[in-house]
Amino acid sequence: MRYNVGFAYLLWLFSGCGALGLHRFYLGKVGTGILWLVSAGLGGVGCVYDAVTLPRQVREANIRARVRAEMEGGNFSSLPGYGSAAPASQPENPEKTILRVARKNGGFVTPGEAALESDLSVEQARKLLEKMSAAGDAEMRVRSSGVVVYFFPEFARDSNDDFAV
């Protein structure tokens, strides 16, 4: 619901310059609406207060309504302190993550490194690396320590590699 300042002032006017508190009921302030109703707007003092502060009260009511709607929908991203109103970014493609790690490491990637940098498990990363190797995108190599690494030649650095023959 979107509250309107003009309509709030119209209710204020028709309720005896705020004495009956109809504008407060409209803004969702039921408790103070009842108080205004039984006390004639706190003896007129509340009526004058509302005449001056009604635009701010309408803004606050609109904020409360937006917060309620966001919380009911489970979408907190547009609320202050909960990130931007823009849709959440998509997670990086796992192959792109592996290639980024390979570039950073001079062409070499282990399944553990790929899993660490992505949302993949080590087993999923290993299978994806094997698939990329089978497609000819990478070479499977074994270090002298026995660790299996996948080598992407396009990201190679000139260095002496520590591999068993």
Image: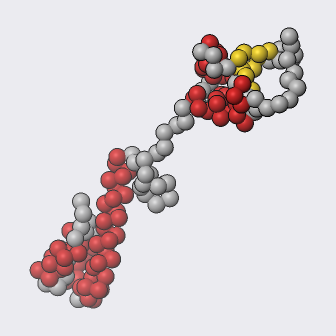
Q: Residue 137 location, x and y as percent?
A: 63, 20
- Closest to the observer, 51 or 66: 66
Residue depicted at 31% across the width and 67% down the height = 61
Residue 46 seen from this side? no
Number of numbered discs on residues: 0
From the image, which quarter does the N terminus lie in?
A: bottom left
Name of the residue lying farthest toward the top: 165
- The front one of 86 and 106 is 106
Q: How is the image coloured?
A: secondary structure
Quadrant assignment, res 21: bottom left
Q: Is 53 rendered above or below residue 69?
A: below
- Horizontal and vertical percent position of residue 44: 23, 89
Residue 12 image offset from top left, x and y in percent: 18, 80
At x 31%, y 74%, the residue is: 57
Quadrant holding the C terminus: top right
The residue depicted at 24 percent of the width and 63 percent of the height is 2
Residue 104, above or below 16: above
The picture places residue 150, in percent across and down from the top left corner, at 72, 20
Residue 81 appears in the figure: yes
Residue under the image location 58 percent in, 28 percent down:
95
- Of 46 and 7, nearer the camera is 7
Q: In the displayed structure, does residue 80 sit left or right of residue 48?
A: right
Q: Is residue 135 above or below residue 35?
A: above
Q: Quadrant of residue 107?
A: top right
The answer to which quarter of the image holds residue 55 is bottom left
